[in-house]
Amino acid sequence: MKPSIYGLQRAELEAWFLENDEKKFRASQVWEWLYQKRVASFDEMTNLSKALIEKLEAAFIINPLNQVVVQESKDGTVKYLFQLPDKHMIETVLMRQEYGMSVCVTTQVGCNIGCTFCASGLLKKSRDLTAGEIVAQIMMVQRYFDQQDQGHRVSHIVVMGIGEPFDNYENLMTFLHVVNDAKGLAIGARHITVSTSGLAHKIKEFAENGLQVNLAISLHAPNNDVRTSIMRINRNFPLEKLMAAVDYYLEKTNRRITFEYIMLSNVNDRVEHAQQLADLLKDKKKLTYVNLIPYNKVSEHDQYSRSSKADVLAFYDILKKNGVNCVIRKEFGTDIDAACGQLRSKQIKKEKVV
């Protein structure tokens, strides 16, 4: 299968042109066609020769995604189900925020992290997405705006879809460089957030990359006992290792980290849990932020339920009294299978029934 040209950084595209006996400046022309004019085929690149277009077509495809399902929520959230060239399916979500248009992208087909409350991990990892397949998700959403003449652009990205981004590290980094490129989509690094379930060694590596991309960590528990019971990854990267990596990241970058915390009734939402979380973060309060997240019910994980509003507020109050920056996350797309992985799982079940 030919790779997507979206998987090349601009310098890599320039190198390809030189290796194929073409002028380097042609790469800039192609880059402009891809990311500023956002063409769907090489034939639309009207300032290229027919011979060059044939070379490009022989080496690459542009868009590797086929749109299968689009769901739009009452609040304007749009959820896409895309099919890859090998027939696997992934999800991408557009969220209309007050500060701009944010897209949540997927980095793997399935997930092996094994969080017991999560819909995206119901299907085990089949493979990593290529960098081109991750970039294409952004391009498909941007074309959605272009075609509807809404005058909008994708301004923010969260890498929080299906899969563990740091388990697909090289393709993730290529994706970040492509979407951040000033001569392309020019999505600012500070408008991009990557979320990890806690691969400590990769957090340290991410601290060295030089990009000012935001980091979020799926924490979901304030002690090892609770975290191990709901997140299998804690067996390999317990809180001691994770927090050591967090300290390294903060010292190296001086950039704030967001801790994601899904509220599970009678599991991790007690007042003692809130105090333990405050104690865990007490020496990091200036550069940390806690996101309290309402739980999205997943039928396959019926042992969990959403924390009550009173319990969430009590948890929030304890964090605030201890000087921890925190917020209760606003929900998006609750009427369209908002939990990551639900749409994909339902489509696969539907196909099996048919």
Image (cartoon, rainbow, N blue to C red):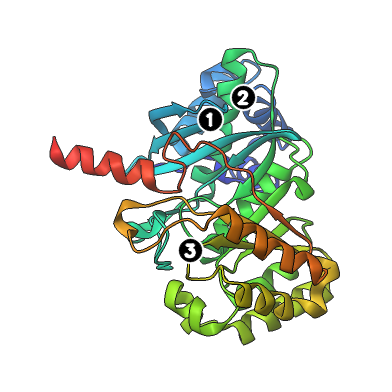
Compare marks 1 and 2 and give the one earlier in the sequence: 2
Residue topped by disc 3: 265
Residue topped by disc 1: 140
Q: Is residue 216 something that shows in the picture?
A: no
Residue topped by disc 2: 38
Task: Indicate which label's residue lies in the foreground, 3 or 2.
Answer: 3
Compare marks 1 and 3 and give the one earlier in the sequence: 1
The residue at 56%/65% (across/down) is 166
Quadrant housing the C terminus: top left
CA gap, disc 1 to disc 2?
10 Å
Q: Dot 2: within a 10 Å radius of its alpha carbon, few (fewer than 14), some, or many (20 or more) residues?
A: some
Residue 344 left/right relative to 203 = left
Residue 25 left/right relative to 110 = right
CA gap, disc 3 to disc 2?
46 Å
Quadrant housing the N terminus: top left
Measured as percent of width and height from the top left, residue 8 is found at 60, 45
